Amino acid sequence: MQREILKYLHDIKVSIDSIYDYLGSKRDFNDYKANKLLRRRAERELEIIGEATNRILKINPDIEISDARRIVDLRNWVIHGYDKIDDVIVWGIVSKDVPKLKIQVEALLTS
């Protein structure tokens, strides 16, 4: 795999790990919703994940990241639609989609 793609995959992994660090083991939606700093941290990491995914797709559009286009679209929504961000949707992404992405990225990094 190209070195540049590996760098972007590493960036995605770091952002995912950061989201996990921010949320801690408790992972409570009410805590998330009540903590603006926590929400902004998670949103920023999702922006990074989306931008890194976009750069990977420009190099190799056939990369094995499911929902890669959706990840990029999420990045655009968080950045450009900042005033329409729905905490419930972001929480769902962080809770359900990010763990799946973590598995895929780790597999790509070790292949």
Image (spheres, rainbow, N blue to C red):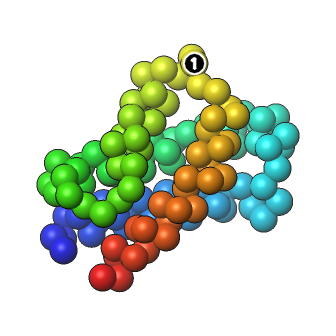
* Amino acid beneath label 1: Lys
Q: For the residue carrying disc 1, how many other residues have a C-alpha within 10 Å: few (<14), some (14-19), or many (20+)? A: few
What's the residue at 30%, 82% (across, down)? 111
Is residue 51 depicted above or below 87 in this figure?
Answer: below
Number of numbered discs visible in the structure rendering: 1
**Residue under the image location 83 percent in, 60 percent down:** 26
- Residue lying at the far bottom in this picture: please name it: 110
Hey, which quadrant is residue 19 in on the image?
bottom right
Above or below, 11 relative to 108: above
Q: Is residue 51 visible?
A: no
Residue 74 screen position, x and y as percent: 45, 36
The residue indicated by pointer 1 is 84
From the image, which quarter does the N terminus lie in? bottom left
Can residue 79 be seen?
yes
Q: In this view, does 3 lie to the left or right of 67?
A: left
How far across and down, in percent of the image, does residue 11 sit? 38, 60
The answer to whether residue 88 is above or below residue 38 is above
- Secondary structure beneath dot 1 equals helix
Picture residue at 17% right of the left edge, 48% below the top: 58
